[in-house]
Image (spheres, rainbow, N blue to C red):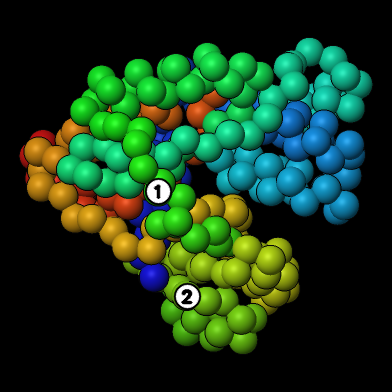
Amino acid sequence: MAGHSKWAQIKRKKGANDKQRGKVISKHVRAIQSAVRSGNSGDASTNLALKNALSAAKSDNVPIDNIDRAVERALGGGEGGNFEPVYYEGYGPAGVAMLVEALTDNKNRTAGEVRHVFSKHGGNMSGSTAWQFDTKGMIIVEQTGDAVEEAAIELGAEDLEADDGTSVIYTAAADLYAVVEGLQSRGLPVDVVQITKLPQTQTALTPHEAEKVMNFLESLEDLDDVQNVYTTADLDSIGESVDAAG
């Protein structure tokens, strides 16, 4: 399964500067509030959307105070609009498929902003791309070796990739939290827990293409309404290309 690229995106978020960190936190706050309101509950044990939003926020090191305030405000009907999820599909530089996930209180505004970025970077929003991605659970364990591999197999994980002291475990979306609990019960250090979308196939890029795709991704992620950007571009090869160019 192709998917280690998602870890590359997470590492970029964790290493973001203060301004970028503020934007990451703001996006998570919006997702938490939307999940509370759509599920009419601040209880993650009964609100799966909230459980997913909280897991993603904690994985990106969002401070607990920000998380608690987001839940309280959503329950109290306070500040923050009524955001709804929307997806945009299209193709970027080098023909890589893109799937953009957003939360918006104004679809016309968000569609216009996303379309502008696609156009500016030589992409287009024609054609369907969602079918090229599978929804999966992803767990990052800051450990490699037989203990992790054996636990993943015993717990019914679908795949595992290990690299540089880190194991990336993939599960069916419905099995994510059961696998997490099993890993934790074995004393394994779980660092990231997320529902994500993985490309069925990936596209390797030349250094020139990689630079274009990375700029495109960053421009999309910089939009306030955009929560996640999924791509068939091999982000691991992008990182290698950028390092080599530098």
Q: Is residue 27 left or right of residue 99?
A: right
Q: Is residue 167 left or right of residue 29?
A: left
Does residue 215 lie above or below 77 as drawn?
Answer: below
Q: Is residue 233 left or right of residue 28?
A: left
Outermost residue toward the front in this view: 127
Spot occupied by residue 122 in the image (x, y as percentages of width and height): 21, 28
Residue at (83% x, 48% y) in the render? 47
The label on residue 159 is: 2
The label on residue 89 is: none
Spot occupied by residue 142 in the image (x, y as percentages of width and height): 49, 62
Residue at (58% x, 61% y) in the render? 137
Residue at (47% x, 35% y) in the render? 88
The amino acid type, in three-letter code, at marker 2 is: Asp
Spot occupied by residue 161 in the image (x, y as percentages of width and height): 40, 70
Spot occupied by residue 202 in the image (x, y as percentages of width and height): 28, 59
Q: Quadrant of the C terminus?
A: top left
The amino acid type, in three-letter code, at marker 1 is: Thr
Which element carries disc 2, helix, strand or loop? strand
- In the rendered image, is residue 110 in sight? yes
Residue under label 1: 129
Judge by depth and name the residue closer to the eye, 148 or 239: 239
